[in-house]
Image (tube, helix red, strand yellow):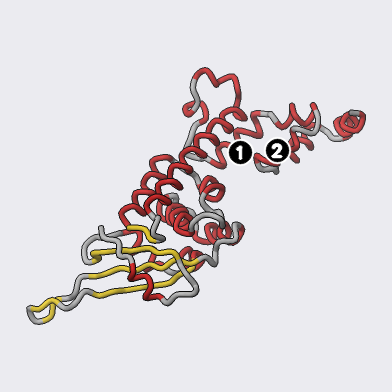
Amino acid sequence: MKQSECIQNSIPHDIALKIASSLQASDLCALGSCSRFWRELCGSDFLWVSLFRDRWPFLDGFQESSSSDTNKGWRGFYIIQHHKMVGRATGVIKFVEECSSSESLEVGDYLKAIKDMCLMQLGFKDVQMFLFKPDLNVLLNLVGLHYCINWLGVPAEYVMEALQSCKISERQVCVKWWKLGRWFYGFRLRDESHSRWVCLGDLAIKEKEVLGVLHRGAVHEVIRVQISVSNPTSTPWSCQSTQARV
């Protein structure tokens, strides 16, 4: 207690607030458990409104929370919203896992998961926290990557940095798509098959064609799209074992 009182007396309030404002939510909570001084300072609305708007820039805490919770301040709004996002992300994870029990995912289910995330209004940090995990199926990592780039509009270099930070940038998927055969002198040629093994890092930075195929799905000339989990011990043609139709 004497030590905490000494710290309180030696650090000006504005400097202490500056230190606290540089922390993320988990670190701010940890600091707030050190003493009464830090608990009161780390519960400041000034800190939590910044964290809330940084994580969910398109949300309003007062609109998202019920009237009975308005006395909890921005820290309370942040915690409430965090728990909501945990439930929403869990729903997406469960859906993708159920649809990919054979280690491959139909593009229709893939795009539905992304659309659901859009409706749920998951933010970039939510994706990093809940979907960019190395212990999750790589198909879930891919869903999160696609959502961030094509729906949230996060710059590719930021997504790449997040992938590397979460140690999933080298994880691979196999994307295979079938195109309708071209017409040649009144005859339609055989359907064209394209297969590509790609790592998540390349998808974020340079594999625009593959990401474009995933984003469009089975439309126009593309009649089927399949996404499979990479298996380093198998050849690329092993992707043909399970074909996903849309």
Front in this rendered view, residue 155 or 108: 108
Taking the spot 40% from the left edge, 64% from the top edge, the residue there is 228
Instruction: Using the rendered view, name the quadrant where residue 161 is placed.
Output: bottom right
10 Å crowding of disc 1: few (<14), some (14-19), many (20+): some
Whether residues under marks 2 and 1 lie with C-beta atoms below 8 angstroms apart, the answer is: yes
13 relative position to 99: left or right: right
Q: Amino acid at mark 2?
A: Leu
- Residue closest to the far bottom: 185
Taking the spot 60% from the left edge, 61% from the top edge, the residue there is 167
Between the C-alphas of marks 2 and 1, the distance is 10 Å
Disc 1 on helix, strand or loop?
A: helix
Image quadrant where one finds the C terminus: bottom left
10 Å crowding of disc 2: few (<14), some (14-19), many (20+): many
Q: Amino acid at mark 1?
A: Leu
Q: Is residue 104 above or below residue 61?
A: below
87 relative position to 211: left or right: right
Q: Is residue 216 above or below residue 188?
A: above
Front in this rendered view, residue 226 or 126: 226
Disc 2 on helix, strand or loop?
A: helix
Q: Which residue is mark 2?
A: 28
Percent position (x, y) of residue 199?
49, 68
